[in-house]
Amino acid sequence: MGMTITEKILARHAGRNRVTPGELISARVDVVLANDITAPLAIKEFRKIGVKRVFDPDRVILVPDHFVPNKDIKSAEQAKEMREFAREQGLTNYFEVGRMGIEHCLLPEQGLVGPGDVVIGADSHTCTYGAVGAFATGVGSTDLAAAMALGETWFKVPASIKFVYEGELPAWVTGKDLILYTIGDIGVEGALYQAMEFTGPAIDNLSMDGRFTMANMAIEAGAKNGIIAPDQRTVDYVRGRVKRPYEVLASDPDAAYARVITYDVTKIEPQVAFPHSPDNTRPVSAAGNVEIDQVVIGSCTNGRMEDLRLAARVLARHRVHPNVRLIIIPGTQEIYRQALDEGLLGVFVRAGAAVSTPTCGPCLGGHMGVLAAGERAVATTNRNFVGRMGHPESEVYLANPAVAAASAVLGRIAHPGEVT
């Protein structure tokens, strides 16, 4: 019996010939990641262990991205603690404001994660890196502290679900729509502690940005990780970025799966996840007349260049509806610079949008777009639970960047075809 790509990666990092679902293993890690919310707790626990130095200053990565630029004194103190620890430990990869980005956009861009890696991060959306064929998953700050000291951690090997996406994507349908449709089908616990392996012709033709979006939201289905086996598109992306050796792996033809689920993407249209769950999805044509107050385009889910280009394509020659606030947040400083060079920021500003430096900000109800009671937002973010973006009586509707931009123009949830 063969192994899935997830099982192969874990076996190699555990020094084993094979692993099977349900086994408890200890595995070395290639990258340990934390942010300005999770790092302070991990640092505190690290100091309790009694070791003086992290296992490898090149592989412990700290990115302030949630409450930066600092929104208050508490967030400033958290960022300071993180900054001082990075200096004390001589960390190679600490990214300061002005040179940083939203962590899950930044690490792939900077070549810090590669195919075949094991990556853990004290952030649930660490699963994003499965798009390059890595096993990547979120852990708690205490587990992260131990890994910072030891360079290894424990896992229960997850079973895998194979998702096969057949056909060609219709107009305006993106990776965001595929993952929302999938979560709407299987539910927020549909892949609980399992690996979501995305395959099929539609995935083969999906851009890297679209793949990052899909892997990013595996956690919204309860998954341990999301993963896409590397192909030539992946290799082209990591070539010249990833400076250390990496391993391109794929599932064996006779690998065992808990389930195999097949979708015909030609029947999928842009999706909207209604409050208050990512699995409360429906096609945008069935959204009805939902008036909105705010639109957020950005986050670790949809803050990449393809997302900004899609939004600009919709917003060109339009103005934001007078009753709507449109906030656009490029995922990294490099994406911001590229959007500036391509003239996209000019499109956004002329349309009446506010453009922010990279930050997670509004996604978690932190700053830069917190909602008041009764307000509704369309967001390209990943979660829309009660109070996720502010007041518990606010509402968040998840959608792709084109739907978000069209909604900003018309003041209600809208299909991009209505304004283009």
Image: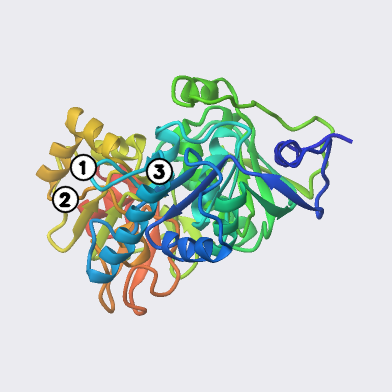
Note whether residue 354 is visible.
Answer: yes
Q: Name the residue at 83% across, 38% down.
A: 18
Which numbered circle lies on residue 353?
2
Whole-percent x and y of residue 144?
A: 55, 57
Q: Is residue 79 left or right of residue 233?
A: left
How far is the residue under mark 3 from the one under mark 1?
44 Å
Local secondary structure at mark 2: loop
Q: Quadrant of the C terminus?
A: top left
Note whether residue 269 is visible.
Answer: no
| Few, some or many residues within 10 Å of mark 3 (<14, 14–19, 20+) | some
Whole-percent x and y of residue 291?
A: 27, 66
How far is the residue under mark 3 from the one under mark 2?
39 Å
Choose between 186 and 132: the one closer to the eye: 132
Location of residue 109 with respect to 319 vertically, above or below: above
Disc 1 residue type (three-letter): Leu
Q: Is residue 216 left or right of residue 379?
A: right
Q: State which tag comes first along the sequence, 3 or 1.
A: 3
Q: Disc 1 designates what residue?
A: 315
Of circles 1 and 2, the one toward us is 2
Which numbered circle lies on residue 90?
3
Location of residue 28 with respect to 158 vertically, above or below: above
Q: Are marks 3 and 2 in contact (CB under 8 Å)?
A: no
